[in-house]
Amino acid sequence: MESMGFRLAVPEEVFQASDFLAGTDQCRANAVNRLFADPDIDGIICARGGYGSMRILPLLNRRSISRNPKVFVGFSDITALLGYFVSSCAMVAFHGPTITTLGTGDSLTRERFLTALTRPKPLTLTASKAQVVCPGRARGTFFCGNLTVLCHLTGTAFQPDYDGCILLVEDRGEAPYRIDRMLTQMIMAGCFNKISGVALGNFSDCGSLDAVHRIFAERLGELHIPILSGFDVGHEAINTTVPVGLAVELDTFAGTLAFTGSALREE
């Protein structure tokens, strides 16, 4: 981070431990609230994923965060926080590497991280291994996250708003039947009734990618929305940083996600 030109402040709370969590819920929520309220902090990048972010959602200060929007980066378990900031605080957040994966990831991960956070120009993300599950073009508000976490938020007060959404999902270590089960639950809950399009990131250690594609085609095919696979987003060496909460166009013919605006303010 410092070699990229960032000045770092490491809060003491990241070294806390409480059973399988990085400190108590109140401790972690207090840290998030304090960092957003601090005018000397321009951005926040999560230390790691795992589990526990959804536990602090009821403890976050929505009013304070909404008044002090800033760069916030994370993925996997952090999906719960990204959804909260976008849906509850009208904020643009970033789905991207944590500190742990930024340090061990491919150089492209670091390059794209730096580009997304420092260049106030609209981004276009091209699928490196594009496979069209259902063809078409669609526009909507972009949301991106871990399928398992999104499934666990279904039916709660913190479920993201998928209406008119272009949703990119990724996951790790989930067998095809569990992916089917999660999608089925979300379908039955009405999550995808008004969704505009779906993109697929990495599904690492999830069995055959062809099987994953068949599941999405079978479960979501009746919606007649574009579905495109092959984006370098998720639990792999290349994890592209993308803005969540911006308008985007999904084009399966070009193999792209093209954002129509910038997530950053030009100085």
Image (tube, rainbow, N blue to C red):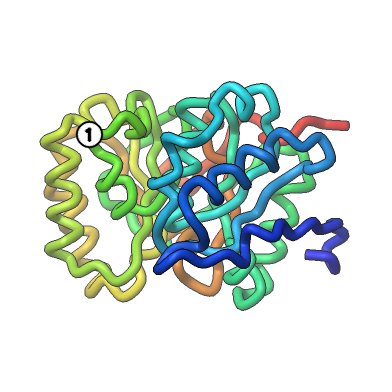
Instruction: Report the front residue among 258 and 17.
Output: 17
> In this view of the protein, can residue 96 be seen by the observer?
yes
Residue 15, position as x, y percentages in the image? 62, 67
Instruction: Please state the total of marks drawn on the protein image.
Output: 1
Seen in the picture, residue 230 relative to 199 is either above or below; the reply is below
Image quadrant assignment for residue 45: bottom right
Judge by depth and name the residue closer to the eye, 127 or 232.
232
**Along the horizontal axis of the image, is 203 left or right of 89?**
left
Q: Residues within 10 Å of mark 1 (few under 14, many from 20)?
A: few
Residue 208 x %, y %: 23, 73
Q: Is residue 253 visible?
A: no
Q: Quadrant of residue 174?
A: bottom left
The residue singled out by tag 1 in the image is 155
The N terminus appears in which quarter of the rendering? bottom right
Secondary structure of the residue carrying numbered label 1:
loop
Taking the image as shown, residue 165 lies to the left or right of residue 192, namely right
**Image quarter hosting the C terminus:** top right
Image location (x, y in percent) of residue 142: 47, 36
The residue drawn where x is 29% and y is 71% is 173
Write the residue at 59% across / 34% down: 92
- Tell me which residue sits at (73%, 48%) in the image: 117
**Residue at horizontal 38 percent and vertical 40 percent from the top:** 167
Which residue type carries mark 1?
Gly
Residue 199 in the image: state x and y as whole percent: 38, 48
Relative to 229, 69 lies left or right: right
Residue 5 in the figure: left or right of residue 21: right
Q: Quadrant of residue 83?
A: top left
